[in-house]
Amino acid sequence: MSNFEGCQLPGVPKFSDGPAEEVDRSLLKRIKRSLAVPWNRYAKKWLKQAYYASLRMRGTSPLQFAAQDFAPALPFSEGDLVRVRSREEIQSTLDPFKELKGCAFLPEMYEYCGTRQRVFKSMRTFMDERDYKLKKVRGVILLENVFCHGAPTFGACDRCCLLFWREEWLERVSS
C-alpha cells in the first residue's frame, strides 16, 4: 500500500468505535443493507456491462445526444454562478441506472433542481475510498454548501460529503 501521509482515510477503521446502531430495524432495511455490497459490486456491474454492450451494438443512444446538448461551451470555474437544470432536463440525460457517464444522480439531488448555486470546484482527481486509489475525473463539479445527508438504505451520515454534479446538469447564469 502507498504512503498516505496527509490523508485520514486509511485511519478511519482505527478511530471509529464500530458500527453505528441501526435506527430503522425493519426487515426490509436489513435485507437491503445485507444485499447492498454484492448488488453494487457484482450484479449491478454485470447489468451495466450488458446494457452498455447492447447500446454499442445498436449505435449511439438518445441519452448521449441529450447530454451533448447540455454540455457547457466553456468549462466551469470556481465561483461561477450556475442553475441546476430542471428535473426533466436531468432525467433526459440519465441511463436506467440513474447515471450520466458513471456519475449517479441521487434522489436527494432533485431538491436542488431549478436553484442557483455557486461552483466550489471543478474536480480533476478524487480519492476513491473503496480501493484507496486516486482517480482522474473530467466534467464533475462540486457546488458550495451542497452536501450528501446519507443513503436511505444505511441512514443519516454526519460526514457532509459534497455531492458530485455532472457539468451537463448545470448551466451558467449571469450574476
Image (tube, grey):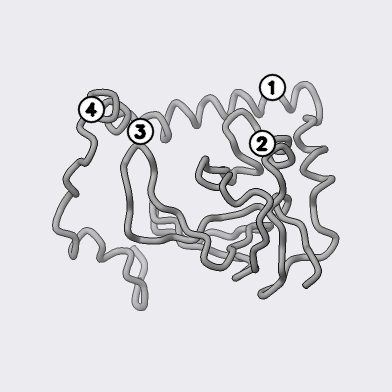
Q: How crowded is the residue under tag 2: few (<14 C-alpha within 10 Å), some, or many (20+)? A: many
Tag 2: amino acid = Leu
Which residue is labeled 4 in the image?
26
Q: What residue type is labelled 4?
A: Ser
Disc 3: which residue: 36
Q: Name the residue under label 2.
A: 94
Q: Position of residue 19 (x, y in %)?
A: 18, 48
Disc on the earlier residue, 3 or 2: 3
Mark with earlier residue (4, 1): 4
Which type of secondary structure does the marked residue at label 1 adopt? helix
Say which of marks 3 and 1 sits in front: 3
Q: In the image shown, does 91 or 1 lie closer to the viewer? A: 91
Question: At which x and y percent is residue 77?
Answer: 71, 72
Q: Where is residue 113 in the image (x, y as percent from the top left)?
A: 64, 48
Asked if disc 3 and disc 2 are in contact, CB closer than 8 Å, the reply is: no
Above or below 10: residue 131: above
Q: Which kind of residue does numbered mark 3 sit on?
A: Ala
